[in-house]
Amino acid sequence: MTKWVYAFGGGKAEGDTSMKNLLGGKGANLAEMASLGLPVPPGFTLTTDVCTSYYENNETYPEDMDAQIADGLAQVEKITGKVFGDASNPLLVSVRSGARASMPGMMDTVLNLGLNDETVEGLAKLSGDRRFALDSYRRFITMYADVVLGVHHHTYEDILENHKDDQGYMLDTEMTASDWETVIGQFKEATKRALGRDFPQDPQDQLQGAVDAVFGSWMNDRACVYRRLNDIPAAWGTAVNVQAMVFGNMGETSATGVAFTRDPSTGENEYYGEFLINAQGEDVVAGIRTPQTLTKKAREEMGETALSMEEALPEVYGQLAETFVTLENHYRDMQDIEFTVEEGVLWMLQTRTGKRTARAAVKIAVDMAETGQITRDEALMRIDPLALDQLLHPTLNPDAPRDIIAMGLPASPGAAIGEVVFNSDEAEAKAKAGHKVILVRIETSPEDIHGMHAAEAIVTARGGMTSHAAVVARGMGTPCVSGAGGIRIDYEAQEFSVAGRIVKAGDIVTVDGATGQVFAGAVDMVQPELSGDFGKIMEWADEARTLGIRTNAETPMDVQTAVDFGAEGIGLCRTEHMFFEADRLANFREMILAEHKEGREMALEKILPVQRDDFAAIFRIMGDLPSTIRLLDPPLHEFLPHTEKDIESVAKEIGVPARELMRRAHELQESNPMLGHRGCRLGISYPEIYEMQARAIFQAQKMVADETGTHPIAEIMIPLVSSAKELEILKGRIDAIAAEIGTSDYVVGTMIELPRAALRAGDIAEFAEFFSFGTNDLTQTTFGLSRDDAGRFLPDYVAAGIVEKDPFVSLDQEGVGDLIQIAVERGRVTRPDIKLGICGEHGGDPSSIDFCHRAGLNYVSCSPYRVPIAKLSAAQAAIRAKG
């Protein structure tokens, strides 16, 4: 018989963290905490295999699962001394999701399950607090109706707010037992109106409905979006955790909270979190009441008056602090913890590896490595390479003038500028259209995930440092200001106001997530500091990696940026970008329009000194580092105007008849220019173009060497080669120019971007001293896809599971990867010392870099801001290879 249910509690458990894939992250960690002897309410976990079976079998459960659930409930009843559904001594449970990868807020939860008109009276008698029991019942109705029955929670919140208004109450805690009786009656009437039937009273039916809802929420829209954004496979499924309830809403000695063992924003080794007295878990993140700080120090720093947990519940806080130490030492990482205090007794509801900003990830990893808690290799593996992007971009200039609009909590650091939008659909649409947007909401919910991902920053009027907006934004690396209580948002008018000041949709604002401030207009930015902990991580990465890291760059600014980030050379300098500059485009067009070689050479003579200066500027920055320079690649028609108006303007500028320019443009137009007269084919037809470029490179090389005493290394790349003969002819012409100028400090190689080139790599290597894999075009030619057009349908292929990821974002290791492996093997047979690199956009993708390491390449090349990402990815690849 398959085991579908695993129990935990009472100081023991049937699982542990090694079973995370089966029990989910929450279930595995609950089992582990129970085994450690920590105070965990007993419960049981329905495995992720149940979820998989559920969806594979038309949303039906395994036949033997119900009996195992009954056994699990009996175990909880034995430990607690309570009985599920018993009117006088009721056991109440929570039902929560628990995927193997943390997905905060994406799936459904039900608390206080088991309450009905009879068990609520039993709970009231047992607790001696009728108000508490009724408060729990109204919470259960609201949550269960929303999650399981499909009646929106606003239905019940409106009833509650109207009652509070009628009674003159501000807070839920002012409600009496009589008030709750009245509201619960109205809740049940509203449920019957919405559904045509009464609210379910049978606890067994309630439990089945909650389990159905949690498994069903694995495929809800927000969960699907979150999985897509975070590369979580749908096939993993979620577990369901059923756990005895403990109550933080039983009076002034009860509380609930969320805590981190270190600051998840900065990484500082200080406890961080919030709690509420006389509350349940959803109150902390809902923003209805202002949460209190955990520590006295945090309270004083934030200028709060409400007592911290350290001050209000000192004994329980001491136990919590001891538990923090136990958990962090056990898991050897910063933990995100949920806890409840029931009448002075601490209970642990969850622990998991805490989501953190890139800055915090780097600091925590370095601190733990330096104190010996983890090794340097483990520190490197702890950091998501893509998250480093958060650290590599400008922040607000502290000396810039600022016009502050609003102030909230610094929920997720970083700065961003954009136009205000008030709903997630609009944020997504505007971002797709190229706008930078700031999403402003009263509070975010999981349904906002797509808009949050599209936004440059997020601002909420409600919510604390552990609210949905704060947690999700930190995980995404998006700046966030939460709990900006002074903001009054009018969704209908598409505006918000602060102290009489109006900000409308479309207005530009700047958000500083590090300080919690929102400013009018665009505030100046400054470049990031890349020393300290970041510098140490880069040093350790350099020691661990074996792959070289180069950059794709052709402007002095980009080259300098890459060198500052530690690039070890240029892997791709695209010379066509230089021809588009205004001071040489007219001359290049003159070359294109020339009817004879002599005319082309005359035009190219005008371009030569400008091109030489371009290369000299790059060589000065690179010093003795190698620079791979790709000779002209795109088809000539791309340099000519296309509209009649542009043709007339250009014809006048270069002094030729408009009809002649139009004739030439039509003559050069190609049906499929990606596969047409471009790359080395231009060099064969018009050798004077490549000869001019080679001469400019060698002259610049010699000039800079004489000026600076360095030895610039030129690697000349011939693009789009498909046969050895092409390369043999063009290399001969380049060698002739080198001999004419008197230089030998160069090599000639090619870009492998056609399947035939990969297959004939052994022949091509006779004339190529290096291969650089142009994976953008190699992906296009292997799949028969246009990168510019495939975006219209590739998401459908990803959703259908035809491809795991967009192959233009992450390398197709089975198809394109096979061609690379073939080229590597055959190239090295002919030329064992051939240098091998990759220069497509995949050179900055961590999984693609891991493939390059395993394939035995010498280096990867990426955009300047991806150099640190590539370094860390290469280090991780080397560590994984060591096992």
Image (cartoon, rainbow, N blue to C red):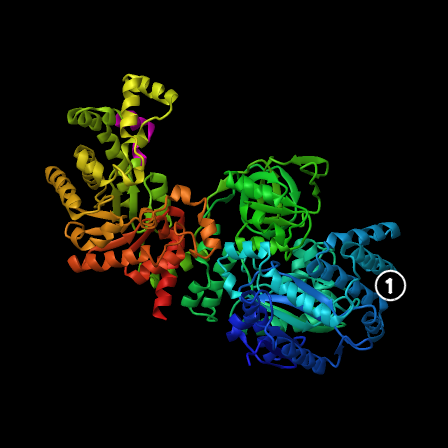
Asked whether, in this view, residue 91 is left or right of residue 218, the answer is right
Asked whether, in this view, residue 332 is left or right of residue 627, the answer is right
| Quarter placement of the N terminus | bottom right
Asked whether, in this view, residue 795 is left or right of residue 539, the answer is right
Question: Which percent across, then down, holds residue 178?
Answer: 89, 61
Instruction: Give the labeled residue for mark 1.
Output: 177
Question: Looking at this view, is 781 or 137 the one in front?
Answer: 781
Judging from the image, what secondary structure is the residue with disc 1 in?
helix
Magenta stretch encompasses residue 580: yes
Query: What is the magenta range?
Result: 577-588
Question: Which percent across, then down, holds residue 22?
Answer: 53, 72
Q: Is residue 479 visible?
A: no
Q: How many marks?
A: 1
Question: Looking at this view, is 7 or 580 the one in front?
Answer: 7
- Give the vertical position of 575 relative to 391 (above or below): above
Q: Residue at x 62, y 52 (%)?
A: 447
- Give the vertical position of 874 relative to 165 (above or below): below
Question: Which percent across, then down, holds residue 460?
Answer: 65, 48
As drawn, the residue found furthest toward the front would be 58
Q: Residue at x 32, y 46 (%)?
A: 777
Question: Which percent across, then down, holds residue 783?
Answer: 34, 50
Image-quadrant location for residue 834: bottom left
Question: Looking at this view, is 287 or 42 the one in front?
Answer: 42
Q: Is residue 194 visible?
A: yes
Magenta span: predominant SS is helix
Magenta stretch encompasses residue 104: no
Query: Mark 1: which amino acid?
Result: Ala
Image-quadrant location for residue 555: top left
Q: Residues within 10 Å of mark 1 (few under 14, many from 20)?
A: some
| Quarter placement of the C terminus | bottom left
